[in-house]
Amino acid sequence: MSHVDRIRWQCRIRPHEPALALPGPDPRIVTYDRLEAALNNAGRRMRELDVFNATLATLETAAHLDLLAARTRISRTEEDGEVRYAGLPAT
């Protein structure tokens, strides 16, 4: 089961539970049902793009993740040709 599958499972069994806490001066809690809606909207938008723009969006996301990793905001690991990104522990 992938990480996305695990998140989507939580969306189905705990729709009104907190999924994310957004930092900032006015912290907000995102529930699993709102997170699922955001995932569905993003997926729908990607499917609506033509091949060129879908590829461009994917490459732009990968470049952004690489930039965050270079600035040590996230970690990047590669194994068997698969690249994984992860958040760093809070300090």
Image: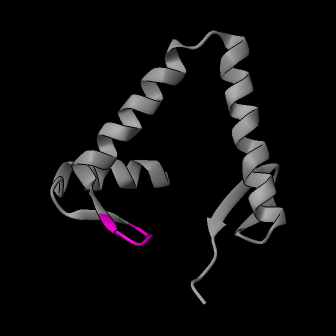
Residue 32 placement (x, y as % from top left)? 26, 54
Residue 58: image x %, image y %? 69, 32
Taking 88 as reference, is 78 left or right?
A: right
Residue 24 on the magenta span: yes
| Residue 56: quarter of image | top right
At a point 68% along the width and 29% down the height, the residue shown is 57
Q: Which of 3 and 52 is in front in this view?
A: 52
Q: In this view, does 22 lie to the left or right of 75?
A: left
Residue 82 location in percent, x, y? 75, 50
89 relative to 20 in the view: left or right:
right
Tell me what residue is drawn at x 72 percent, y 52 percent: 65
Residue at 44% across, 70% down: 23
Q: In which quarter of the image is the C terminus?
A: bottom right
Which region is colored magenta? 22-28
Q: Is residue 35 above or below residue 79?
A: above
Residue 30, by quadrant, is bottom left
Query: In terms of secondary structure, what is the magenta stretch mainly?
Result: loop
**Numbered-mark total:** 0
Q: Is residue 10 left or right of residue 53?
A: left
Q: Which residue is drawn at 74% across and 48% down?
A: 64
- Image spot of residue 10 (x, y percent): 27, 56
Q: Can residue 1 be seen in this view?
A: no
